[in-house]
Image: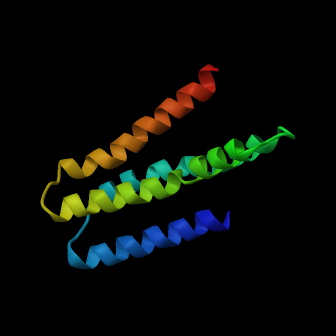
Amino acid sequence: MEVLLGLVVLVLLMVLRSGRKQEMPVGLMIFNLIPLSIAPVLLFMSIFFFDDPKADWRAYAAFFAVNSYPFLILAGMFCSFRLYRQGRHGWAWVPPAVFHGINLCFVAWVFLN
């Protein structure tokens, strides 16, 4: 939970810092933050990777890979803001849209299995 709170603080600082240079649209900021809502579910599900008493290095690798997803979202947010500042306003919506697609595939997989 502390990691998620730290990510939110980092995102808010980034938004405040980037807002001083050039005004970012609120819709783009919110569209970038929505994929972070699935991070607590991923954290909860990744705990069960260690249910097997013979869990080897693959369980640890999968745990860290799944829980690094919020950092990928933040990297996509940095790319999105940079594209917007460069004047490529249409392309700034692509990185968060990729994460929205990943989240939709994950939710569909959870509910269809």
Rendered residue at 83%/38% (across/down)? 52
Pick the residue in front: 75 or 23: 75
Direction from residue 89 to residue 105 in the image, left or right: right
Please identify the quarter of the rendering in which residue 25 is found.
bottom left
**Residue 19 x %, y %:** 28, 74
Q: Residue furthest front?
A: 57
**Residue 3 x %, y %:** 62, 65
Query: Is residue 90 shown above or below 104?
Result: below
Instruction: Note whether residue 39 is visible.
Output: yes
Rendered residue at 60%/63% (across/down)? 4
Instruction: Note whether residue 41 is visible.
Output: no
Rendered residue at 36%/54% (across/down)? 76
Split into 4 quadrants, where in the image is the N terminus?
bottom right
Q: Residue furthest right?
A: 53
Direction from residue 72 to residue 66 in the image, left or right: right
**Residue 86 x %, y %:** 14, 63
